[in-house]
Amino acid sequence: MTDMEMEPHIMTQRIWTVSEAKARLSEVLRRAEEEGPQRIGTRRGYLVVSEAEWQRLTAPRPRMGAWMLEHVPQAGALELPSRAEAARPNPFDPRGAA
């Protein structure tokens, strides 16, 4: 078994050899549930994840348009400020050019 430290205060990732994972399968499964994904193998890596984590990762996500319809306020829900000041002159209006 190898311990790889990416940053000591952030994460220590354990990589199990295939033979070690076979011999200690219960521990691999327990750690996947409690600590997160467990990596097995060095050349061809595999991950063991808990069912809850798998469900979270593979759950369907709403499409962007559907999400926007649910979360963006509707036109009537917005309160717009009043335009009490006089309208500005239109610089493209040939009648208003002086």
Image (tube, rainbow, N blue to C red):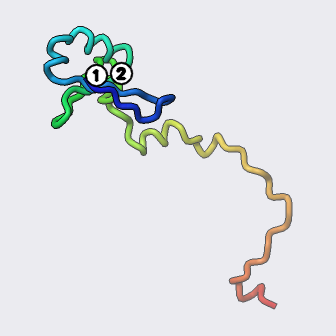
Closest to the observer: 69 or 87? 69
Would you say 75 lies left or right of 94 here? left
Q: Earlier in the sequence, mark 1 or mark 2?
A: 2
Category of crowding for the residue at label 1, using alpha-carbon neighbours closer than 10 angstroms: few (below 14), some (14–19), many (at least 20): some
Contact (Cβ within 8 Å) of mark 1 with mark 2: yes
Give the amino acid at mark 2: Gly
Give the image location of residue 91, x and y in percent. Answer: 73, 82
When the figure is inspected, residue 93 is found, relative to residue 21, above or below; the finding is below
**Which residue is drawn at the image coordinates 69% and 83% (left, top)?**
92
Give the structural element (helix, strand or loop) at label 2: loop
For this orientation, the residue located farthest to the top is: 26
Closest to the observer: 55 or 1? 1
Give the image location of residue 87, x and y in percent. Answer: 80, 69
Would you say 70 lies left or right of 83 here? left
Would you say 24 lies left or right of 88 here? left
**Which residue is drawn at the image coordinates 26% and 15% (left, top)?**
28
Q: Which residue is mark 2?
A: 36
Q: Residues under labels 1 and 2: Cα distance?
A: 7 Å
On-image quarter of the N terminus: top left
Q: Quadrant of residue 39?
A: top left
Q: Which residue is mark 1?
A: 49
